[in-house]
Amino acid sequence: MKEILNFIDSNVDSYIEELKDFLKIQSISTLPENKTDMQTAAQFVADKIKQAGIEKVTIYQTEGHPIVYAEWMGAPGKPTVLIYGHYDVQPADPIDLWETSPFEPVIKDGKIYARGATDDKGQMYVHIKSVEAILKVNGTLPVNVKFLIEGEEEIGSPNLYTFLKNNTELLKCDAVLISDTSLWEEGVPTITYGLRGISYMEVEVTGPNRDLHSGTYGGAVPNPVNILADIISKLKDKNGRITIPGFYDDVLKPTKQEKENLKKLKYPEKEFAKSIGIKKSVGEKGYSLLERIWSRPTLDCNGIVGGFTGKGAKTIIPSKASAKISMRLVPNQNPKKIEKLFTKYIKKIAPDYVDVKITSIHGGSPFIAKLNQPIMKVAAKAMASAFGKETVFMREGGSIPIVVDFAEKLKATPVLMGLGLDSENLHSPNEHFNLNHFRLGIISSAYFMNGLANL
Ligand code: BES
Ligand code: MN
Ligand code: MN
């Protein structure tokens, strides 16, 4: 390991330069105008994996954006690790709030600023470099390694599931190594053992057949904006509980072991509120802050439009209003079932004198792992060796829809070796990634592969 560590340290600066080139590619999966950037990013990933010394690299086209697959199977009899990550990023808007341009990476105070820096280009790149370092130093890897890097994670992985289902033999592995979550705190090695799922819906209310003069018609016409606001306000009660009948039926209670683990983690309410500029946290009554984020489901309106939203005033009764509403789900809630319950309830509470259209945008299942699996222990030890501290275990409020399918379809152990920080502005202006975590991530990844070989 010593030689590998030295090699990583003498090359980390050039790794960061490469990461900059990666971050310049505007691989925004949700925007049609960036379709060719998606091909460019997939090609970049494939080229870098090849440069790392892996010959078998394939770009699979899908109905959406390409999937990059690679494998090095030179360690017969040893375990196989599949490295999963995503090269797609979220849109950069609101652009005005960026201090530097989102696709012109800049390093400041040991952090690299760009869209995708922490989610997930920087975190994912770590593993390409660890494989490269080991191969360059030893000419071989201690375990078999596969890469599966997709370009549709931020839009709910619509094509990856089919790819996974059709290629279970190709993707066969023992562990799935993923760096796409957060550390508990700066410099604290962390393994995440739970993710929330999601049901993302859109509700559109239509009233009159066109925008109307609000004086000539006001007082006699259903206003879709008012009605939509009324519908949204009915989705939660005063205790922060979601009112959709049956919504909580399948929610799993935390185990004893988990409760014990949770006691070790302190997240002061004040610090939390201060870090995001709110007066105090809110949410479901009777649950702690961490429970509300990690192990309880939620419902939030992500955006709402309707009527006149420009500068100044325009006196109208709008014809339409719509809202994007997402629900974060926890084990054992099922996104398909939640979609149905949501739709049924909205139809029930919406007045019959407007048209209501409800569509599902995407969904993903929640995930929870058992804590005492040998592969998880190897991962915890690897991170502890790299960071020089004991590894903590936590859950996350965010979602990575495909993770549960890795566990179920491949019968492999997902290892969520996150390297980001919640404060690194993912999905937000001024996204950045701590370069010390980048370096420690490469080292953790190398330790993990070594540890797995000796399991
Ligand atoms: N990397 C995130 C998920 C994440 C964020 C995990 C923070 C832990 C901490 C991922 O890229 C993401 O944003 N997922 C989406 C999934 C959705 C589009 C289906 C999410 O959680 O909103
Ligand atoms: Mn991500
Ligand atoms: Mn994301």
Image (tube, rainbow, N blue to C red):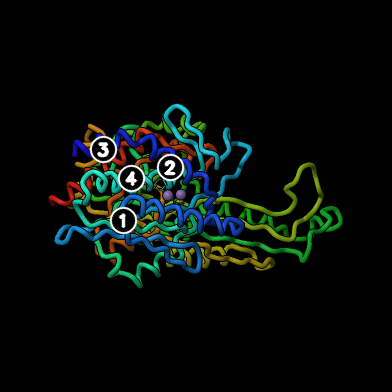
Q: Nearer the viewer, residue 97 or 66?
A: 66
Q: Position of residue 239 (x, y in %)?
A: 46, 46
- Could you give the CA–CA distance between mark 3 and mark 2, rounded to whole angstroms? 41 Å
Indicate which disc residue 54 carries. Answer: 1
Distance between mark 3 and mark 1 Cα atoms: 44 Å
- The amino acid beneath tag 4 is Lys
According to the picture, the residue beneath numbered tag 2 turns out to be 18
Q: Amino acid at mark 1?
A: Ile
* Distance (Cα) linking label 4 and label 2: 10 Å
Q: What's the distance in space between the residues labelled 2 and 1, CA to CA?
A: 17 Å
Q: Is residue 199 above or below residue 51?
A: below
Question: Given contact means CB atoms under 8 Å apart, are the residues at marks 1 and 4 in contact?
Answer: no
The residue sitting at 30% across, 69% down in the picture is: 168
Q: Amino acid at mark 2?
A: Glu
Residue labelled with disc 3: 263
Residue 26 spot, x, y in % from top left: 54, 49
Number of numbered labels in the structure image: 4
Rendered-image quadrant of the N terminus: top left
Residue at point 38% right, 34% down?
Answer: 13
Question: What amino acid is found at the position of numbered circle 3 in the picture?
Answer: Lys
Q: Quadrant of residue 75?
A: bottom left
Q: Name the residue: 66% across, 67% down.
A: 355
Kindly state the secondary structure of the residue where label 1 is placed: loop
N-terminal-most mark, 4 or 3: 4
